[in-house]
Image (spheres, rainbow, N blue to C red):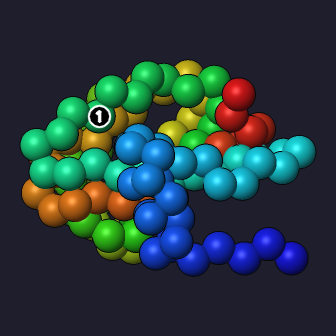
Amino acid sequence: MKEFRLDRLEAERMANQGAYLRFLRERNMSVGLYALAPGEQDTQRAQRQDVVNVVVSGRAAMTVGQETTTVARGSVVFVPAGTPARFHHITEDLRVLVVFSPPEG
């Protein structure tokens, strides 16, 4: 069994001074923690994998392809492979668990 705590993942992400920390990679998927502060730019590009974004805290708008929605704690957004997606209008510190299938590079 592999068990992770968000507070420890957040501390590790901050220690590495990056917006993204991949903490799990398996044969069929990988998982990371993504963080953006209010006013920060989301520079992600369209991914080669299907992606599930699970918002664990914060509030923002998210655009996937041509559709935009508001996301907050508890939101789950699926992004098909090859579809542009980004967070914007971030109003509260955003923390997102990001699941890639197949695993990211």
State whether residue 53 appears in this view: no
Quadrant where the N terminus lies? bottom right
Q: Between 3 and 52, which is closer to the camera in this rendering?
A: 3
Residue visible at 25% across and 65% down? 58
Categorize mark 1 by other alpha carbons within 10 Å: few (<14), some (14-19), many (20+).
some
Look at 44% across and 53% down and name the residue there.
15
The quarter of the rendered structure image containing the C terminus is: top right
Where 26 sits versus 59, above or below? Answer: above
Q: Viewed as shown, does residue 96 lie left or right of 48?
A: left
Amino acid type for the residue under numbered disc 1: Asp
Q: Is residue 36 left or right of residue 96?
A: left
Direction from residue 2 to residue 51 in the image, left or right: left
Residue sitting at the far front: 15
Query: Residue 93's spot in the image, x, y percent?
Result: 22, 61
Seen in the image, is 2 located left or right of residue 100? right
Q: Position of residue 80 (x, y in %)?
A: 57, 35
**Does 41 sit above or below residue 9?**
above
Q: Quadrant of residue 100?
A: top right
Q: Which sits in the foreground, 41 or 55? A: 41
Q: Secondary structure at mark 1?
A: loop
Query: Which residue is found at the position 65% from the left and 54% from the top?
Result: 23
Q: Position of residue 46 (x, y in %)?
A: 48, 23
Q: Is residue 102 above or below residue 46?
A: below
Q: Nearer the viewer, residue 103 or 81?
A: 103
Please tell me in which quadrant of the rendered image residue 75 appears.
Answer: bottom left
The residue at 53%/65% (across/down) is 9
The picture places residue 66, in percent across and down from the top left corner, at 30, 29
Q: Which residue is denoted by mark 1 in the rendering? A: 42
- Residue 16 drawn above or below residue 46: below
Number of labelled discs? 1
Asked if one can make out residue 24 in the rendered structure from this viewpoint, the answer is yes
